[in-house]
Image: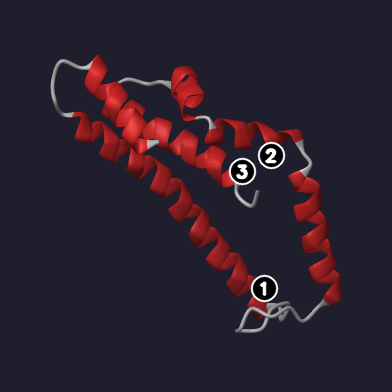
């Protein structure tokens, strides 16, 4: 995705500074995954404190296991999951639909693409 983004920026600009836009795009994408990772780490800590998980990430509650599995299974069948999966897997379509100019636009595009790919994760 970053290579495709960079190629398009090079063709659209008269100046050869496409790497700044690519870095902004990648930074936006990685920011979403970093925020998600921090949230998951906090959730893991909370589950450990409530004794639903051991420090080795083993579940201690069958009901918790079942609800988590059920929620993940239901999400796999939602239209939201399918829409996000389509946007994540089709970079040309994503760029066509969500193109933003400039460095801040590239960052916002990275955030959007990261969000779609995060929501599509687990497929």
Q: For mark 2, give the secondary structure.
A: helix
| Residue drawn at x 48%, y 36% as measured from the top left | 113
Q: What residue did someone put label 1 on?
A: 47
Q: What residue did someone put label 2 on?
A: 81
Q: Left or right: 72 with respect to 42?
A: right
Count residues near mark 3 (Cα–Cα under 10 Å), then give few for <14, some for 14-19, many for 20+: many
Q: Nearer the viewer, mark 1 or mark 3?
A: 3
Q: Is residue 91 above or below residue 27?
A: above
Q: Is residue 9 above or below residue 3?
A: above
For the residues labelled 1 and 3, the Cα–Cα distance comes to 24 Å
| Residue drawn at x 40%, y 48% as measured from the top left | 30
Q: Left or right: 62 with respect to 56?
A: right
Q: Left or right: 95 with respect to 121?
A: left
Q: Are marks 3 and 2 in contact (CB under 8 Å)?
A: yes
Q: What residue did someone put label 3 on?
A: 120
Q: Position of residue 51 (x, y in %)?
A: 71, 81
Q: Position of residue 106 (x, y in %)?
A: 34, 30
Q: Is residue 59 above or below residue 99?
A: below
């Amino acid at each position: 995705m970053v290579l495709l983004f960079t190629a398009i920026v090079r063709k659209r600009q008269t100046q050869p500074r496409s790497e700044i836009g690519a870095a902004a795009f990648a930074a936006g994408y990685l920011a979403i995954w970093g925020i998600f990772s921090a949230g998951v780490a906090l959730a893991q800590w909370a589950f450990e404190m409530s004794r639903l998980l051991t420090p080795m990430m083993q579940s201690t509650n069958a009901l918790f296991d079942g609800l988590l599995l059920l929620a993940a299974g239901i999400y796999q069948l939602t239209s939201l999951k399918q829409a996000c999966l389509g946007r994540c897997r089709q970079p040309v379509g994503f760029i066509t639909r969500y193109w933003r100019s400039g460095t801040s636009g590239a960052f916002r595009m990275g955030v959007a693409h990261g969000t779609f790919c995060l929501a599509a994760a687990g497929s």
